[in-house]
Amino acid sequence: MAAPIRLGVNVDHVATLRQARRSAYPDPVEAARLAERGGAQGITVHLREDRRHIQDHDVERLRASVRTKLNLEMAATAEMCAKALAVRPDDVCIVPERREELTTEGGLDVVAQRAALREIVEPLRRAGIRVSLFVDPDPRQMGAAAELRVDAVELHTGGYAEARDPYRLDAELARLRACARQADEAGLQVNAGHGLRLDNVRPVAAVREIVELNIGHSIVGRAVFVGLEAAVREMRAALDQARRQS
Ligand code: PXP
């Protein structure tokens, strides 16, 4: 049997719900604590340039409270590099970012952006932060990532997650397997994530070279349904208690 796969839980969308009201709850720091209690081996957040969900103070509070490890997803910009050097997450995952996108849409083009990425990767690694690059399962990207001497790649599983017909699904899985092997042979740690759910995660989790999966949206979405009944019961009990005491 292969070594157990590690689970990083992305709590961005707890902050999405909070930001919808600009309220203090639900708090992603509290969500991270529960995720760790549930077995997460890492907490992931994406500090976007537009701050649409996670805020700077969330990252600082998470740094102080996360007991497993903190993985900061960020764009390859000087602002984000300075932020990471100040907060010192355990890991940084560099992702491409476009303001108008709903979520990270594709992997980094490491081949085309080699020089710019080096400017960000080197100071982070010198500071002892492990650096990962979020890339599509494309052999050219594995080669370029290895040349940049990063610690890890995170394979973008969005193409697999969105595949509708079985042929496409098999082809996407084959791409993930081949790139996982290539990256592992090049000495890179192999992580993966995006769009993974309870009903599609197993074939990816079975790829032996993959060390860690980062999963967010489906876990936060599922938590609404796993927890909604209990939340209504709590409110119902509070209303009834208030009436009994009035
Ligand atoms: N990994 C990376 C690099 C991401 O950008 C995201 C989305 O923020 C995830 C993993 C998690 O994706 P999802 O929320 O679809 O599980």
Image: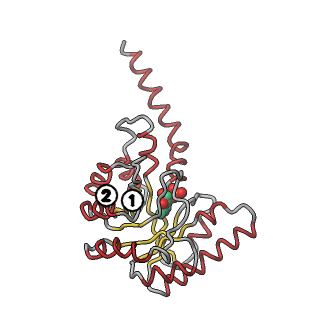
Quarter of the image for residue 179 reads bottom right
In the image, is 203 to the left or to the right of 12?
right
Quarter of the image for residue 157 reads bottom right
Q: Amino acid at mark 1?
A: Ile
- Please, which residue is most extreme toward the bottom here? 185
Disc 2 and disc 1 in contact, CB within 8 angstroms: yes
* Residue sitting nearer the eye, 138 or 243: 138
Residue at the image position 26 percent from the left and 76 percent from the top: 126
Q: Amino acid at mark 2?
A: Val
Q: Which quadrant of the rendered structure holds the N terminus?
A: bottom right
Q: Position of residue 216 (x, y in %)?
A: 49, 55
**Would you say the beta carbon of the disc 2 residue lies within 8 angstroms of ligand 1?**
no
Labelled disc at residue 43? 1
Q: Which quadrant of the rendered structure holds the C terminus?
A: top left
Q: Position of residue 51 (x, y in %)?
A: 39, 48
* Residue sitting nearer the eye, 85 or 35: 85
Residue at the image position 51 percent from the left and 46 percent from the top: 223
In the image, is 19 to the left or to the right of 57?
right
Labelled disc at residue 66? 2
Quarter of the image for residue 9 reads bottom left
Q: Sort mark 1 into few (<14), some (14-19) or many (20+) by Cα contacts within 10 Å.
A: many
Q: Position of residue 130 (x, y in %)?
A: 34, 73
- Please, which residue is most extreme toward the top here? 246
Q: Is residue 17 positioned above or below 199 on the image?
A: above
Q: Sort mark 2 into few (<14), some (14-19) or many (20+) by Cα contacts within 10 Å.
A: some
* Residue sitting nearer the eye, 38 or 49: 49
Q: Secondary structure at mark 1?
A: strand
